[in-house]
């Protein structure tokens, strides 16, 4: 079955560490996205990518980096510059730009 | 930028009851989606509805784009309907804005 796989489900980061969250899709979607969700709040866009080797900053890109070397993969790195990284991170993909999203099951990141 | 407001923020229902969730948006949008986030965090696309009415089983949605609102109807609610319901509007250029959600708890 087609879908989006995020790993790991839970991730613990020490202060000052960089960590990378994985997102893989087999839906043949061109666009991929990373969202951050804080408790009791909606989703905020971190980065998105329309096509391979291209990506754009979203509303809260500071302290994050991404790459899009393959159509299927869009990893997110949470760098030490992100001062408050504890959150739930969701990856999504879509065929075009107007939505119709499919979401992964998320990664819960905690700073220890 | 565009504002997306959902109401009510929280809702508790007895199993079998009906409910209406509302999404207001402050400007014209190209598209609107409703999502359900289950207690484990998984988001499922319920409706892709820029205008008009759609139905899927016990759920239906109506968007009146000219008046800038959308409604999600849940009939004969079940405990598995619990979770958070998000409205998300597409404004162009790969930007989709999510509301803060309506948290629904259905009691057995």
Image (tube, coloured by chain):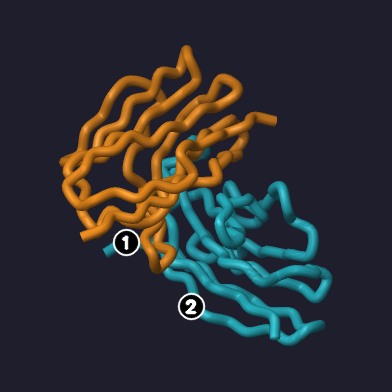
Chain colours: A cyan, B orange
**Residue B93, above or below B38:** above
Whether residue B76 sits left or right of residue A100 in the image: it is left
State the residue in front, B39 or A4: B39
Secondary structure of the residue carrying numbered label 2: loop
Against A83, residue A96 (above or below) is above
Question: Which mark is nearer the camera, 2 or 1?
Answer: 2
Residue B85 spot, x, y in % from top left: 41, 47
**Residue B13 placement (x, y as % from top left):** 29, 49
* Mark-to-mark CA distance, 2 and 1: 19 Å
**What residue did someone put label 2 on?**
A9
Q: Secondary structure at mark 1?
A: loop
Residue that numbered label 1 is attached to: A2
Residue at 58% over, 39% down: B97
Horizontal and vertical percent position of residue A93: 47, 53
In terms of depth relative to the viewer, which is nearer, B55 or A18?
Answer: B55
Residue B27 placement (x, y as % from top left)? 60, 21
For the N terminus of chain A, the image quarter is: bottom left
Chain to which the residue tagged by mark 1 belongs: A
Look at 26% across and 40% down and name the residue there: B74
Quarter of image, res B75: top left
Q: Residue at x 58, y 82 (%)?
A: A11
Looking at the image, residue A18 lies above or below residue B8: below
Other residues around mark 1 within 10 Å, as few (<14) / some (14–19) / many (≥20): few
Tell which subunit mark 2 falls on: A
- Front residue of B54/A112: it is A112
Task: Pick the residue in front: B76 or A19.
Answer: B76
Contact check, label 2 and label 1, Cβ < 8 Å: no
Q: Quadrant of residue A78?
A: bottom right
Q: Is residue A37 left or right of residue B42?
A: right
């Amino acid at each position: 079955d087609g879908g989006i796989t995020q790993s790991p489900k839970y991730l613990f980061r020490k202060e000052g560490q960089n960590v990378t969250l994985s997102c893989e899709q087999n839906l043949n979607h061109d666009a991929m996205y990373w969202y951050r969700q804080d408790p009791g709040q909606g989703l905020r866009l971190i980065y998105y990518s329309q096509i391979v080797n291209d990506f754009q900053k979203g509303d809260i890109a500071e302290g994050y980096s991404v790459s899009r070397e393959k159509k299927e993969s869009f990893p997110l790195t949470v760098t030490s510059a992100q001062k408050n990284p504890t959150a739930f991170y969701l990856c999504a993909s879509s065929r075009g730009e107007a939505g119709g999203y499919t979401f992964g099951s998320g990664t819960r990141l905690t700073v220890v | 930028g565009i504002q997306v407001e959902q109401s009510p923020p929280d809702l508790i229902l007895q199993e079998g009851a009906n409910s209406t969730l509302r999404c207001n948006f402050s400007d014209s949008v190209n598209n609107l989606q409703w999502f359900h986030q289950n207690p484990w965090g998984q988001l499922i696309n319920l409706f892709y509805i820029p205008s008009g009415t759609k139905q899927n089983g016990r759920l239906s949605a109506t968007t009146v784009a000219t008046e800038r609102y959308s409604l999600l109807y849940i009939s004969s609610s079940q405990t598995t309907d619990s979770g958070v319901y998000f409205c998300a509007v597409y404004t162009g250029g790969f930007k989709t804005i999510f509301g803060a959600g309506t948290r629904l708890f259905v009691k057995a």
